Amino acid sequence: MLNIKQFEIGQSGESLNIALASDDSELSEQWPFSVEYLRVVSLQGFNTKQAIPTHKKHVKLLRIEAVAKHGYRFCFDDQHEVIYSTSELALLHQQSDTLWQQYLIALAQTGHSRETSIEIKQL
């Protein structure tokens, strides 16, 4: 079984690399993630009961906190927090292409965008 040995948040805060190893070995695997992906698929994801997370292209990961034996709390700069277990992160890694495509399709079907939106009000 692989265990998480290190999280490395990219300088921009928009990427994450997870280093894994078995108990008796050195580094054996790397899981690269975009922070946008981790934010938009966070547990609830974009199922029909939840609103689709939009405008998250430049969301940043501020910190990761250990949560007892349960997993890791990911804190994003849009005030969203989610707890992922190692097995959930493994599943997100394995299904990343499929889940990302489902997200892009859901955005297109609802007419939303990944791009950051700025609301301009005339005074």
Image (spheres, grey):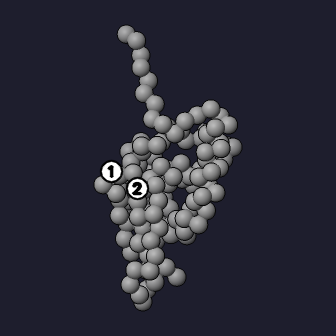
Q: Amino acid at mark 1?
A: Ser
- Marks 2 and 1: CB-CB under 8 Å? yes
Per the image, label 2 sits on a secondary structure element best described as strand
- At a point 37% along the width and 10% down the height, the residue shown is 123
Q: Would you say residue 109 is visible in this rendering?
A: yes
Q: Which residue is mark 2?
A: 15
Q: Which residue is mark 1?
A: 12
Per the image, label 1 sits on a secondary structure element best described as loop
As displayed, is residue 48 above or below residue 75? above
On the image, the x and y values in percent for residue 106 come to: 65, 42
Describe residue 49's horizontal placement relative to residue 23 as left or right: right
- At a point 64% along the width and 57% down the height, the residue shown is 98
Which residue lies most toward the left here?
11
As displayed, is residue 82 above or below residue 4? above
- At a point 42% along the width and 67% down the height, the residue shown is 18
Please tell me which residue lies in front, 84 or 8.
Answer: 8
Describe residue 51's horizontal placement relative to residue 10 as left or right: right
Residue 95, image quadrant = bottom right
